[in-house]
Image: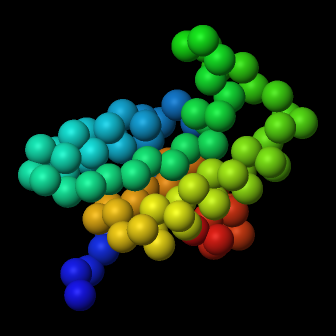
Amino acid sequence: MCKKTVIINRAVPGSGKTSITRCIVNSLSEAGYSCGIHSTDEFFMEKGRYCFDIRKLNGFHQQNLKNFQDDVARGVDVVICDNTNLLPWQAAPY
């Protein structure tokens, strides 16, 4: 059985989480690893613009976690959670 890796990338907004995640994924993909990136912010993207709606936040977090768990279950080599998750309880489900 192969070991799989999970990365929980958490930091304040605007600190470069997504940029670092892209660098990690680009390097790993070039080396032949499968990767899954899971960012709740992506659910707020509409036609290339970030359109935050607090009413959708909880549902989007739940969908992001489900997608993350699905990648882990499928055996994706490296599964990344790219969310702010500043408090431990926010990252704990991942």
Residue drawn at 58 percent across, 33 percent down: 42
Q: Could you tell whether 28 is left or right of 86 in the image?
A: left
Can you see residue 8?
no
* Furthest-front residue in this view: 74
| Residue 64 against residue 12 in the figure, above or below | below
Place of residue 7 in the rendered image (x, y in percent of width and height, measured from the top left): 40, 62
Q: Quadrant of residue 30?
A: top left
Place of residue 71 in the rendered image (x, y in percent of width and height, measured from the top left): 46, 62
Residue drawn at 26 percent across, 80 percent down: 3
Which of the image's four quarters has the C terminus?
bottom right
Figure label count: 0
Q: Quadrant of residue 12?
A: top right
Q: Name the colour scheme.
A: rainbow
* Furthest-bottom residue in this view: 1
Q: Quadrant of residue 25?
A: top left
Place of residue 93 in the rendered image (x, y in percent of width and height, measured from the top left): 64, 71
Residue drawn at 63 percent across, 60 percent down: 66
Q: Could you tell whether 60 is left or right of 65 in the image?
A: right
Residue drawn at 81 percent across, 49 percent down: 58
Can you see residue 41?
yes
Place of residue 59 in the rendered image (x, y in percent of width and height, measured from the top left): 80, 48
Which of the image's four quarters has the N terminus?
bottom left
| Residue 47 against residue 76 in the figure, above or below | above
